[in-house]
Amino acid sequence: MTGFRYSSIAARSILLAVVAPSCGGDPDPAPETETWITEPDFEFGDPFGGPAAFAQVSDVRVSPDGERVFVLEPYLARVSVWTPDGDLLLDMEKPGEGPGEFRTPLRVEPGRDGFSVHDTRRFTFFAQDGTLLHTVPNPPSALSFHGFRLEPHLLTKSDGYLAVPSIPGTVMAGWTGDDPFDELPVLHVLAEDDRWTMDTIAALDVQNRNLALRPAGSEWEFTWELHTGQPLADDDLAYFDPETGTVVIARRNFGDGAIRMLEISPSGDTIWHRRFAVQPVSLPPEFLEGAIDAFTGQLVNQSAMAGQPVSRGEARALVENALYAPDPLPSVQYLRGMSTGDLWMQTFEEADTLMVWYTIGRRDTESGLRRVLLPMGFRARDATPTHVWGVRRDSLGVAYVTGRKLVRRIESE
């Protein structure tokens, strides 16, 4: 690395461009929402061992033609490829540092001519048969944002990266003398003429993302602490799309079921935005009480193990002071871009024993949402025009990769 430039002017101007379309006004009107249900169709797994005995599956993706299902198991450094019927096509369990090996793979992404795997060090590209094609390393570790290492999420079409700085919990909470972090930049990182440039293209609101707890009034540098995510966080959600090289941001902290969606290019242009609303859901008192009890018990145990015990009453007061409890609940829990190009959003809404998801077409500005009812515990990982794919676990915790058929519900139902 021979040089570095950080464009603060670009950061300020682009931040205004990102925020402006998302502020104020009622959600855009939309035609009536269609409701879809799903039916069991494809499923493979094995409770007795063998290639289909899945461990902790973190990602399921489907090829553009719908004929290849990619399954990622990060702790095994394993990528396996299957037909929808469960026939194994390719099995790559490659922990290590060498060419074509993985160190904690984060994401698998199919393409028309092969697939790629992103791990904590690099992006690795393979042919359909698993032949190694080439690798692209992460930006050099010496490159940082105000001293914080970068966490790249995707490669852009210009051979750059979209990245977010990785900031320790103590710093995020403001425990090191500076103010707490309320925003995180989305950075376009690019090597140009032997110099690295880094421009802020968006700012993510993270003020209610983290739950940070420690003894009241403590000034010890290494006392016990608890850093985790707020269970009801309403920070901005971001989906980094390797197909388009863009980032989609969902702003969900309006408290009325409203959502503001923006798609940002690496140059910082807002190329699509839309406002809409889903059904608001009130905060269930039992949920709040359960979260308080769980975190209180965790603090009591952690403080005792550290030799600095606090009473249950003290721990509960710490939790109640730090826990973020919006009412109504955040409009969206989870955001995911699918192989179809649609965006899928999990909400807190329930319909009998089913969870309610909504889907919207990318860069769609007029049509209504599609409301999809999915079983409890099923998190959609990818979708084709006919199926939604994810993971199901049985009563013994055995994981099955599952493709559920999408069926439009008739109004008389």
Image (cartoon, grey):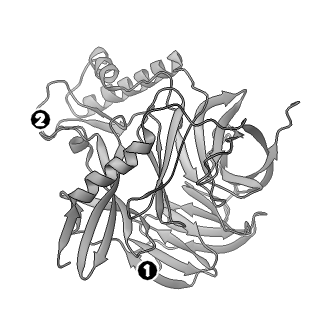
Residue drawn 19% across the image and 24% down it: 216
Q: Is residue 128 visible in the rendered structure shown here?
A: yes
Quadrant (top left/top right/bottom left/bottom right) for the N terminus? bottom left
Q: Which residue is mark 1?
A: 135
Report if the CB atoms under discs 2 and 1 are less than 8 Å apart. no
Q: Quadrant of residue 236?
A: top left
Q: Amino acid at mark 1?
A: Thr
Q: Which residue is mark 2?
A: 220
In this view, the mark in front (2 or 1): 1
Q: Position of residue 68 (x, y in %)?
A: 70, 69
Q: CA distance from mark 2 to mark 1?
A: 44 Å
Relative to residue 221, is residue 381 drawn left or right?
A: right
Observer-nearest of 90 and 354 = 354
Q: Position of residue 161 (x, y in %)?
A: 38, 68
**In the depicted structure, whether residue 172 falls above or below residue 14:** above
Relative to residue 115, is residue 178 drawn left or right?
A: left
Q: Residues within 10 Å of mark 1 (few under 14, many from 20)?
A: some
**In the depicted structure, whether residue 371 falls above or below residue 293:** below
Q: Position of residue 179 (x, y in %)?
A: 18, 38
Residue drawn 47% across the image and 76% down it: 124
Relative to residue 147, is residue 246 drawn left or right?
A: right
Q: Quadrant of residue 284?
A: top right
Q: Position of residue 319 (x, y in %)?
A: 33, 23
User: Tag 2's secondary structure?
Assistant: loop
Q: Is residue 121 visible in the rendered structure shown here?
A: no
Q: Amino acid at mark 2?
A: Trp
